Image: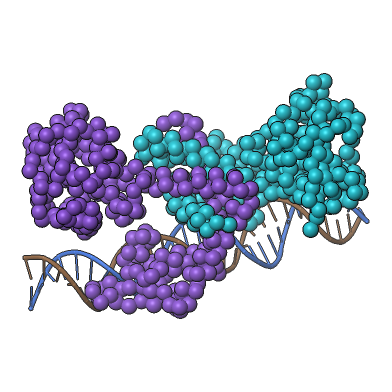
Chain colours: A cyan, B purple, C blue, D brown
Amino acid sequence: MDETMIAQVRRFNRVVTQQVGALNDRFLARDRPLGESRLLWEIGDGRDVRSLRTALDLDSGYVSRLLRSLEAAGLVTTQPSPADRRVRLARLTEAGWAERRLLDERSDALAAELLATLPGRQRERLVAAMAEVERLLTAASVRFAVTDPDDPVARHCLRAYAAELDVRFDGGFSLDHGIRADAADVRPPNGLLLVAMLHGAPVGCGVLLFRDAEPAHLKRMWVYESARGLGLGRRLLAELERLAAEHGAPAVRLETNSALTEAIALYRSAGYTEVPPFNAEPYAHHWFQKPLPPPG
Amino acid sequence: MDETMIAQVRRFNRVVTQQVGALNDRFLARDRPLGESRLLWEIGDGRDVRSLRTALDLDSGYVSRLLRSLEAAGLVTTQPSPADRRVRLARLTEAGWAERRLLDERSDALAAELLATLPGRQRERLVAAMAEVERLLTAASVRFAVTDPDDPVARHCLRAYAAELDVRFDGGFSLDHGIRADAADVRPPNGLLLVAMLHGAPVGCGVLLFRDAEPAHLKRMWVYESARGLGLGRRLLAELERLAAEHGAPAVRLETNSALTEAIALYRSAGYTEVPPFNAEPYAHHWFQKPLPPPG
DNA sequence: GGAAGAAGCTGACTAGAGTCAGAGAATGGA
DNA sequence: TCCATTCTCTGACTCTAGTCAGCTTCTTCC
């Protein structure tokens, strides 16, 4: 890693935590402790105590105490969940909503104040650079994990994948038609399912099927609409290729539908070349292949 | 202010405090309280307690206590300043330097880790955007204050101004030659001295001299070398013009030396036009003037 | 030389943030 | 049915961060 890059990141951290971090805390702290404000904010439309705990990464006893305090202030009510009476649901009262709106306004005002100190041209450049940093920092916190196809997260991904293709393909799409990739095929050693996770939520996936010394077969590659524009597709593809090479596959091949123009452009720019059809996938119009370096 | 800009700033704040803020604190907190680590860091080559207090914006008693704690840990020693025995100087011991180096390395490692998750092109874009955000946030936290010319900060500015001109002008420069602007001239109602401050340190200044209904005379405008490239000169000029207009001056005029090419370019682009010499300033080669809108 | 003020220190205090052990209610599986 | 587990809550702590008043020592200005 280049030293000047590291130094820049550190300068950025220092300046930003001084400017933004301090302000951010100040706006949330309205006569009430910061922890309470953050909780109030996080409750929003109503959440169970457990999810609040994991979202804010706080001790269970601590959250409990904060909730009691918010309850005493008349901002929050809690009640047992009908589904599981051990779990308690917290929701905002009318006063709680009012308080939350106030925090919202203060937050807006603070952002406006920051921008107001700069003349117009610099302001626009700042906002643009902030958007870029935000986008790339988000991308940087995406993690890839090989996941069991029966995992709820994995099922969710595949359902979302199918739902989008059903809309985009002429004549729709179903996981049950065409060449299938059932749970058993997608588990090692037959294959694998890679999921891209962002802060605990899936934002993309891809499947590899292995067949001895033949090329690995790539399917179900997909990035959530909300996570596009982060260069995630390219990274997902690279990670899948790495896994295929690690498994000893001499190449990766895949088929795709001509409706998926961005995907096709991605494959081409990543070094894939179009080859004659290597299977009879009814949904496919194009077949691609890319050789892999030997493992190790 | 545009709503989408505000929303972008808020998204940036959220993402950055989550990603960077948390990490930043975690790296500094090495079994020792964060306040002590920050102080350790700030002491560096040795500083007086007073400057530490203002730099970190902490209570004097609190800093004192933190220093005692660092002293007890053998990381810091303090001794009275020879110049003023009320002031105490803090400096790092060998162990203190070792600890500081360790913090440094951890900080580097953290930054490198963040960058390593991104592929090369995105990494470069992130660093570039971070540089831009840092630069503009720094610019946004500059504040302007009319300051008494006998204030140490003001004296410091004028000395630095003179020192730079002495280097840049053919034949040197001295505040005592040419047309002078002594303390009494630079105090209301005769005139004023505006200082640009960044986090408690001066980064630029400018002087206005008023003479009834005549144009206000702008002198001593200067931006610290370390603070250039932030668009500060333009803002300083605008602020001085605002103050002159507020005072009822019909215009601002100024003279300048041809060695100060950036300044001349700034004046021109800010709407100043060159006029015949309106005084006999020996250091000057160019005279400029710009009309002001009436006050109110 | 004396008064006023600056710099730093100490003691006494508060509030926030969080940890930990254990209790009690509800649930789920054998 | 019973036992282990989950979820939440309470009580009893700790530690950090910070404030405030008042003190001593030293400097500066008249």
Which x, y percent locates residue A137? 58, 46
Give the quadrant of the N terminus of chain A.
bottom right
Which x, y percent locates residue D6? 76, 53
Q: Residue at x 49, y 37 (%)?
A: A128
Give the quadrant of the C terminus of chain A.
bottom right
Using the rendered image of the protein, determine whether residue B78 is visible from the camera's viewpoint. Answer: yes
Q: Which image quadrant for residue A164?
A: top right
Residue lying furthest front in this view? B170
Q: Residue at x 27, y 39 (%)?
A: B266
Please name whichever residue, B263 or A170, is drawn nearer the observer in this view of the structure: B263
Does residue D13 sit above or below B112 in this rendering?
below
Does residue A113 sit above or below B77 in this rendering?
above
Q: Is residue A166 left or right of residue C15?
A: right
Which x, y percent locates residue B261? 26, 43
Q: Residue at x 79, y 47 (%)?
A: A292
Please name whichever residue, A294 or A25, is drawn nearer the observer in this view of the structure: A294
Please name whichever residue, A294 or A89, is drawn nearer the observer in this view of the structure: A294
